[in-house]
Image (cartoon, rainbow, N blue to C red):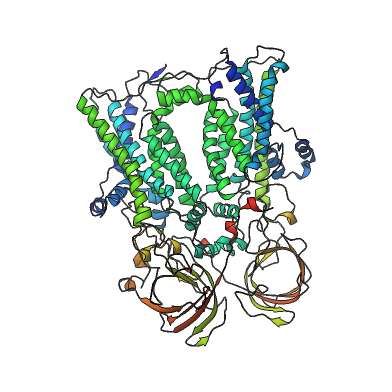
Amino acid sequence: MTTLTSSLQETTPAVAPANPGVWTAWEKFLFRVFSIFVLLLIIPFDSVWLGKLFQVKTFFAFLNTLTGYRANFYEVHTESGKWGLESYATWAIAFGIALILGGVWTFFARNSKRTQYNELYYWVRVIVRYRIAIGIIAFGFLKFFPMQMPTPSLSNLDTNFGDYNTYKIYWQVVGVSIWYEVVLGIVEILGGILLLFRQTAAIGAVIIAGVLYNIAHANIAYDGGVHVYSSLFVLFSLFVLVQYIPNLWKLLIKGEDVKPNLYYPVFNKKWKRVSYYWAKYIIIFTFTLLFGILRYDVHYHVGQLKEPITPGLKNAAGYYNVSEFKLNGQDVPYSPLDSVRWQSVVFEKWSTLIYKVNKAFPISLANGGPNPKDVDRNYELAGIAGGRRFLFYNAKNGKLILQDKDRPSVDEDGGSAKKTVAVKPESKKGKGKHHKDDKKLIWAYTRSTPNRIIISGVNEHKDSLYVVLDKVDKNYPIRINRANIH
Amino acid sequence: MSNAQQHTSGQSWSSIQIVWFRIVFVFLLLLTIPLDWRYYQRIFSINLFHLHYQDLFQLTNYVPRLVHISDWGIASYAGWGIALLVAIIFAFVWDTLEKDGNRDYNQLYYRLRVIVRYRLALGLIGYGVIKLFPVQIPYPALSDLQTAYGDFLPWKIYYLSTGVASAHYEQTLGAIEILAGLLLFCRRTAVVGAGIALALLINIVLANFAYQLGDHVYSLYLLLLAVFVLAYDTPRLYSLLVKEKLAIADHFKPVFKYRNATKWRVALRAIFLVFVIFYASVTYAGYHNSNWPYPDTPGLANAYGVYNVREFRINKNVLPYSATDTTRWQDVVFEKWNVLSIRANRHFPIDFSSPSLDYQTDDQRTYESKGNGGRAFYTYTVTDSTLKLVNNTVPSDVEEFHISRPDKSTIVLDGIDNHADSLHVVLDKLNKEYLLDKGRRKPVTVN
């Protein structure tokens, strides 16, 4: 009773097989079904995704797309299909197909003399382990070079908590502490790396199952939108763990000594051995070190980010009171109820100007993923309300050329083939129309003193504006270190 | 510590291992056993007829505080330093204290593990139950929704963010903590419980440091306990999973010299289990019947909402709407309970204390004002048409207003503020919709 060769006991992990090395009929059936199931979710059949994979412009984009394949056999177009149980339709379909194929396989194999699938099971596990590792390491680097959850921007700090969407709250709180985000990234990368080696695969799978369960549940709890993809890692990690469970049960719970006897392939030819190790270490090198270096490059040099990088007006970043507001030459006094008169203005350190009025705007419900162009980098407005209008600007010769940032765009996160825009462009009626010839506003600005900016120009309703802005120093309590309070 | 792990009974220990063990033994006991008379004072001061779950929670939450220098930084661990120092001294004088030189350290190690397991289980269940029945981190108050993100202290942001989760997220985390605790009660499953606890506690410790939640000492202590429990089984797990060699199971059998030891062990387990069930029931009842951590006293009838300050007169001077004026109120929130909060363009004194699960009577519950730097919070009482306000953070700030309500959505306040200025304030209820309530599942147009 100290050895255990077969380890596929998904239903009855506590019972050791009568004859180690020989699988029971049930074990064989379950192996067939579950192997087909996970492979259906791993092997990319999606022509759209494959098309995208080979259309990318950079080697990094190619790798990044490769790390993030999400099987998508069927999308249920209901609320639950995107956010609830029905969003797992692809899993259900894959499982149904696996059950059928597994049944057919079992039928045709009924007279087979084969006693076990040790070798096949091993290679399926390798595929699953590498799939988890590649995907999660890519996600880990997003946090390690902290860009998945940026630090809250000035305008976001000024936004009331109730004017946040839940998903933005979930991301923002991580962005509040950047080193915490980096540590979370390290844990994901570490778990992924452990899964690349057979000796540490079990520990890696435990870490990834735990971390990704938390992420999946949180995504459901906050409508984060990636609950299916994060659940996939939990599913795969559990698949990897199954073979260890009988031994762990015997050793820890039943208190028996265990000498593990797991199957590993033996490479009896030199060329097999050489090609195995080459393949292994090329994959590992590519998706850990090389991917990390490229991600670093993309983050700090190319600027593939969620936040804009063009610097804003020099020394202008800050919160401004609107001291004077003239509409068509008419002075409009400050009022929290006015839908035209600006209440406050924020200049970010990048080229975004945000003004606040008492007006309901359509809310950007996109994830605000990384984008190559500043005007499309919409993380700062994703899930943010409070009557704020976000304008991208280009400053030239005392003029600001401005564009509304709330425009449909495509997120590029983790190489997803689908658009992850929560609200499809057609549902934002009228918006799509002036997307092509984005209306641009041209305002003049003068800076009489370092803390004053005067803006004049014509707004989109052809009304002339004259606005005097005075900078206010805001010391936000969120930056207070309680250790310094006595 | 790691040297002294894999020993089945009968194996003898090297002298280095013994020294290490003694240090760990004394250190952990000093941090675990309540030597503090205040702990017992607390137990005996519990009013059994008005038992509150916070009383029970505090019992699970106790850590001896050997010394107190600072709540923050390395100095907050000063007590650990002292415990370690005492432990090291003890380890070397141990021989002179002990008459019997042939002590079986395996047995002593087992006893320490039992204490640590139970202590860890209690800590996990203590926190798990108040998450399962979410009284630790409630849904934000309306005043929170009307406060700028940057106006909160980081811990409050963390609490509010957790509080808005749906899909039983917080409750599930609580259930996992309880499960880990229950697994720790049994010797065979303790390793699984400790593993789950380790995963949870690593995250909790990190979050405590990242957001200054205030429990960094206690959570790190629990993490230490989880590591200690897990360390016992680490070598066999390493053999099984990493080296894939023969893994020796735990064949240790505890030996008890006393006749009734078995009975006592059963009784001890029963007491723990009864305590857990009792604590969970009392917490559930408290969660169900009370608004905790918010006050239970209802607020002014039909007043709940956000109000625009339409008119503001100070000493008969009308102050128009202004973003810069530091006196004029900007908006007012009436909570469902007897608290209102005011926003104005000035820095309000912030309550810097950490959230506390100590029992508080209604008027001492100030969770909503803690860590909020954007608003002034007042607990109010209404007698006839007099509204008396007491500032939650600055108790000397007491204001009294005559209140009238000309129609459903208007409240007029006349009175004297704490600077002896006379105020006349007209409040209009706003029909404010929050994006937070709208979600992202359908297109949203909202202010």
- Say which of B275 and A304 sits in front: A304
**Image quarter of residue B78:** top right
Residue B247 percent coordinates (x, y): 45, 20
Compared with B438, B179 (above or below) is: above
User: Farthest bottom residue?
Assistant: A329
Residue A85 percent coordinates (x, y): 42, 49
Residue B144 percent coordinates (x, y): 60, 61
**Image quarter of residue A472:** bottom right
Q: In this view, does A299 lie to the left or right of B212?
A: left
Residue A478 percent coordinates (x, y): 58, 57
How many numbered dots are placed on residues in this image?
0
Q: Which residue is drawn at 43% across and 49% down?
A: A143
Q: In this view, does B368 lie to the left or right of A117?
A: right
- Say which of A281 and A349 sits in front: A349
Quarter of the image with the N terminus of chain B is top right
Q: Is residue A291 left or right of residue A14?
A: left
Residue A98: in sight, yes or no?
Answer: no
**Image quarter of residue A24:** top left
Q: Residue at x 62, y 78 (%)?
A: B321
Residue A393: in sight, yes or no?
Answer: yes
Q: In this view, does B166 lie to the left or right of A295?
A: right
